[in-house]
Amino acid sequence: MVYPYQFTDFVWDLYELSYFEKYVDVCVLDLSAIINPRHSPSNKKESLKHDNVRRLTSLYQFYKYIETLPMNNKVCILDNIKYSSFKEVVCGLIMYVQLKKYKNIKIFDLYNGGVPIYRDDVNSLNAIWKFLLFSKNLANIQDMWKGFKRFFFKSLSVNISKMHTHYLAAGTEWLNLSQAYNLNHKTLVFGHSYDYSKFLQSRKNVRPSLVAGKKYAVFLADAGPFSGDDAYLGFRSCDVWFPSLVQFFDTLERETGVVVKIAGHYKSNYLPTEPLFGNRNVYYNQTLDLVKNCEYSITIQSTAISMSVAFEKPVICIFSNELKNEKITMRNINGLTSRLGISPINIDENFISDNFSDFLHVDLDQYSKYKSGVLTSSSSNEPNYKIILRDIMGVNTDQNKNKLNIL
């Protein structure tokens, strides 16, 4: 796997790499020091349990590693580079130049974000027109230059991605996006979003509730304050957002007879019992189990909402007076709620408690459309790792470990 950001244990689990290791040799190239140095391990301590994650600090190291791949064996590369900057494009070109002479190399990408896509079809004329409209609203030359670079690299990425041999798509919307990038001449594999793949695995593993004997709701938290930085809150401020959130949780607990538990975002650093949440418990790496056994879930726009849809749990979408000013967030919230057949709640306004049960309604028809639109393209109950091993890498998971490399 080629990964352009800081690689963590969370990402290892997200891509199900422990399952791949049972059948193939796995190696991860962490390019964060090259592509995103501000978020690289050298500037941020992050312990990893896995020895087969290699931190590359220069383009030369990346070039030499690609050059030493065991081409006599089968090699499959999961390419996570998004080609949105000069450094990403250079890394992609190095990989392309080094690998294009080998016919047995397979390079694949994933179109399985697990969230609705709010965008127009991708084509050159439409992209140019959108850029021109966007540039009219830019405040200065520097912003215009940034906008041009985003447009240029996004256009370039369409051509670079043509070196991929396969791609996995989950849901009709993500399938349409992949085809809009002219990938319809590649080998298409039908799979699932990350969370839906975990959901399928969880159906085979019966686990007790994290809060045995108690009814609870789960708040799917976003990153929030990260190492003391409020940047992840966007338009929200800590001294306004969290008191309103705590008051809202208090009301939920009083009206619905539940205890609110917090599913911590993997980028956050909340305490196990967090004062910002009214001294409520925060759980990390347990979101699936929390959602599986909850009465309902609460979210702003977390991608983990797909777990609630998969388990057919009621969803409460929230926003605040401050968030009203954040157009992109509100667009996503309104889009999400319309897709699920629910209404969002402003936590800064008093809602009518007598009608609160209306917010806990599950529209099974809308949930089904959500699943087929953004969560899964496959009728198979097999998780992604088995689909990728069989349909891309040619590995029979019913037999002993095959000698195959995945990068």
Image (cartoon, grey):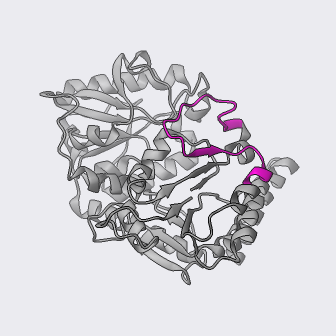
Q: Residue at x 78, y 60 (%)?
A: 90
Q: Residue pushed farthest bottom? A: 185
**Count of marks overlaid on the render:** 0
Which is nearer the eye, 204 or 21?
21
Q: What secondary structure prevails in the magenta region?
A: loop
Residue 72 sits above or below residue 145 on the image: below
Quadrant occupied by the N terminus: bottom right
Q: Image quarter for residue 133?
A: bottom right
Q: Residue furthest right?
A: 141
Residue 235 visible in the snapshot? no
The part of the chain drawn in magenta is 38-62
What percent of the width, then of the height, locates residue 100? Answer: 70, 75
Q: Nearer the viewer, residue 54 or 231?
A: 54
Counting from the top left corner in percent of width and height, residue 368 is at 27, 64
Residue visible at 52% across and 74% down in the picture: 166
Q: Is residue 21 above or below residue 218?
A: below
**Quarter placement of the C terminus:** bottom right
Question: As rendered, which of 231 and 139 lies closer to the eye?
Answer: 231
> Is 104 situated left or right of 58 in this image?
left
**Residue 340, image x and y in percent?**
32, 56
Q: Quadrant of residue 293?
A: top left
**Residue 119 in the figure: left or right of residue 311:** right
Q: Is residue 341 magenta?
A: no
Measured from the top left, where is residue 13 in percent x and y? 42, 46
Is residue 168 in view? yes
Q: Is residue 196 left or right of residue 333?
A: left
Q: Quadrant of residue 124?
A: bottom right
Q: Residue at x 62, y 45 (%)?
A: 54
Residue found at x 67% / y 37%: 40
